[in-house]
Amino acid sequence: MEYKIGTGARCAVIGYGSWATAIVGLLAANGQRVGWYVRNPEVLESLRTEGRNPRYLSDLEFDRDRIAPSDDLDGVVHDADIVILATPSAYLKDFLAPLTVPLRDKFIVSAIKGIVPGDYQTVVEYIHDHYGLSYKQIGLFTGPSHAEEVSRGKLSYLTVVCTDPGNAQRIGEKFAGGNIRLSYSTDLYGIEYGAILKNIYALAVGLAVGLGYGDNFLAVLIANSAGEMTRFLEESYPDKRDTQVSAYLGDLLVTCYSVYSRNRRLGLLIGHGCTVKSALNEMTMVAEGYFAADCIRHINARHKVDMPIAETVYRVLYEGAPARRSMQELTTKLI
């Protein structure tokens, strides 16, 4: 089925974390009134009375006339034409569980860089299969961009991905202006899986830094991560794509080196000697790479792509392999 986004399409955001908050900020700054599903009572009350999210990006103040926060999921979705999913992938099913309004006349955009645990599917694949939507009415957007910099007006880049370039342009118009630079793609598969894989590779970088490896090794590790990502994409879903552009390589780089990268931080904690359990407990936000490491290994059982970096991260996280020995073994496999 064809789906064309109209010029006056109304947007709603599902989720109340840092990325969801930054997205609402961008939409509201463009003069749009944004529906916002917030299931946390404390956050909902603060947004309604003070125009701030007390848990995430609390320095960002909203014009309360431009946001419509609500704990009524059906109401938020009913009033929207474009529904933007911005929850951690691990909680997506919980967030959507109360939904009874059909999605067949909506355009769904995933801002989630993770795989739905247990289902071993990307968010786009999950929405397609579980809600019966055509891939033509599902899109996504990615970086390189971190919510903390977006909310502070730092120069940031967004890539909007839809099978129909016209729909991608319509969505991009909602975010255009200020310090946001936009690019567009039709590679739903490649960009979504690339965004998932870069979280695993950021975990590997965090492990290396925590174990005391230097910049020379990190350069080799990240370069090999880029090659491993390209190899997986080409062998699992061949297409004409340039993985050297920002949506793939740029997003990988910023997630590997940024102080805002929660995946890098999780790896860093484990590299410093924390157990996986204690490191996860110390995290204040979800590190998508933790779930992705298990899911990608499961998915790759079909494709059998050589992925030594992703496999190393999996063994450390899920099999209890010693981080130092595992990284030493990995060094012999990199070029």
Image (tube, rainbow, N blue to C red):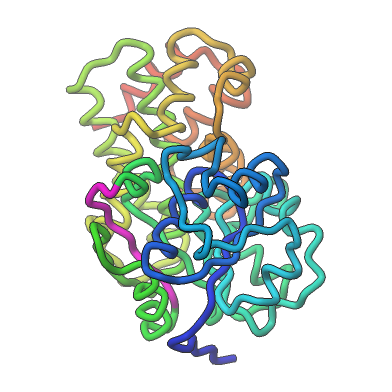
Residue 80 found in image quarter:
bottom right
The spot of residue 187 in percent (x, y) is 39, 70
38 with respect to 312 (left or right): right
Viewport quadrant of the N terminus: bottom right
The question of residue 97 being in magenta is answered with no
The spot of residue 232 in percent (x, y) is 42, 52
Q: Nearer the viewer, residue 327 or 149?
A: 149
Task: Report the magenta residues as a range.
Answer: 153-162
Q: Nearer the viewer, residue 65 or 3?
A: 65
Residue 323 against residue 115 in the figure, above or below: above
Q: Nearer the viewer, residue 7 or 297?
A: 7
Point 28% across, 35% down: residue: 222
Residue 31 against residue 328 in the figure, above or below: below
The spot of residue 203 in percent (x, y) is 43, 30
The question of residue 157 being in magenta is answered with yes
Residue 84 against residue 88 in the figure, above or below: below
130 with respect to 155 (left or right): right
Point 68% across, 68% down: residue: 76
Viewport quadrant of the C terminus: top left
187 with respect to 83 (left or right): left
Residue 326 found in image quarter:
top left
Majority secondary structure in the magenta region: strand
